[in-house]
Image (cartoon, grey):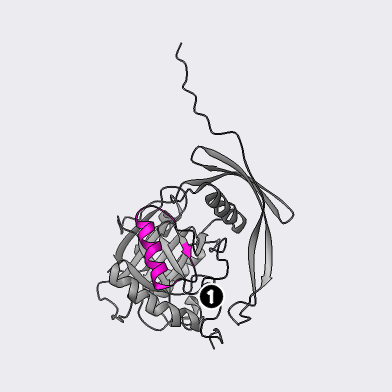
Amino acid sequence: MPRGCDHPDGCHTGALPTFASATVGARSWLLVEYSGPWADRVENSSLPDGIAKLVRRATERGIRPQLIRRPGRRTPLSDQGIRVLVAYAAGEEPWLAQGIVAGPDDLDLDAVMAGVVPESCILEDEPVFLVCTHAKRNACCARIGLPLARSLAEFLPDRVWETSHVGGDRYAANLVCLPHGLYYGSMSQAAALSAASAYRSGEIILDRYRGRAGIPEPLQAVEHFARIHTGVLSVCGVSVESSRLDGDVTEAIVRCGDVRLQVVVEPSVFQAPCGTACAETITTYRLISLDRLSPVRYVTPVLT
């Protein structure tokens, strides 16, 4: 039986902190269109053989598989093949590509792992937005996610997909922006539209921002506090130059444009005020210190 909140608002109002909670193990993505029923876990779903094998191959390689479907539509499987989207979310130049493959062996997942677009796919020049609506995993994901996905699709037709579990039921409704793998949580319809619009302009909105997938949670927290301090909102405007862990404390050197910061954070756990099945406790991060270092200097070489 899927979990969910007893209270109609539960822990999904945006009042709880969401930062530093994006899924750590997702640097490459495989999205497979499948409008049939989704089990509690993708691997437990009664999938057609071709899709099941494709999901298994992706999982074996460390690529995150997601089932997707159009909001409000339950289209039958295509006779032409399996519709897929693949994304490489690592680094400053992530990419997203789409294709229809005849079978699971026609998609080069090793190329995806290497950051190379498979020959069977075509690069996309617009992002896609995933809204988790996985009812079998958590009832709140469907209760809040379904209307959000349909509303967002009205503004961004053909760029929005319902998706299976993305991680973090307590943050429903969850929105993922690809190809960068940006996570937002506790989203209202208005907040989702603002976040999607900002992403299409190359920026992040810090309100309800969970972080970027594939990055350790302490460094997501470091980035969060660096952005608050400097006001830098461009997607790739903040980079961690170095970091070290001392017990639970993480110290990092961060570059924000021409500003360098030393940021120190540690985990902080507190009881969720709603006390529901979705979130008995919340783990977040506390800022210990933030100091500006010497500015980045660019020296013009002298020719002799």
Tell me if residue 177 comes above or below residue 170 in the rendering: above
Q: Residue at x 49, y 62 (%)?
A: 207
Q: Is residue 131 visible?
A: yes
Q: Is residue 128 left or right of residue 262?
A: left
Q: Is residue 192 magenta?
A: yes
Tell me if residue 246 comes above or below residue 158 in the rendering: above
The kind of secondary structure element at disc 1 is helix
Q: Is residue 102 magenta?
A: no
Depth check: 60 or 186 in front? 186
The quarter of the image holding the N terminus is: bottom right
Q: Position of residue 223 (x, y in %)?
A: 55, 52
Q: Is residue 48 visible?
A: no
How many numbered dots are placed on residues in this image? 1
Location of residue 77 by image quarter: bottom left
Location of residue 3 by image quarter: bottom right
Q: Is residue 217 left or right of residue 56?
A: right
Tell me if residue 99 comes above or below residue 44 in the rendering: above
Mark 1 surroundings within 10 Å by alpha-carbon count, few (fewer than 14), some (14 through 19), many (20 or more): many
Tell me if residue 162 comes above or below residue 26 in the rendering: below
Q: Position of residue 271 (x, y in %)?
A: 67, 74
Depth check: 295 or 46 in front? 295
Region rendered in magenta: 183-204
Location of residue 50 by image quarter: bottom left
Q: Position of residue 300 (x, y in %)?
A: 46, 22
Q: Which residue is mark 1?
A: 169
Say what amino acid the circle numbered 1 marks. Asp
Q: Is residue 136 left or right of residue 116?
A: right
Q: Is residue 102 left or right of residue 211?
A: left
Q: Residue at x 34, y 66 (%)?
A: 84
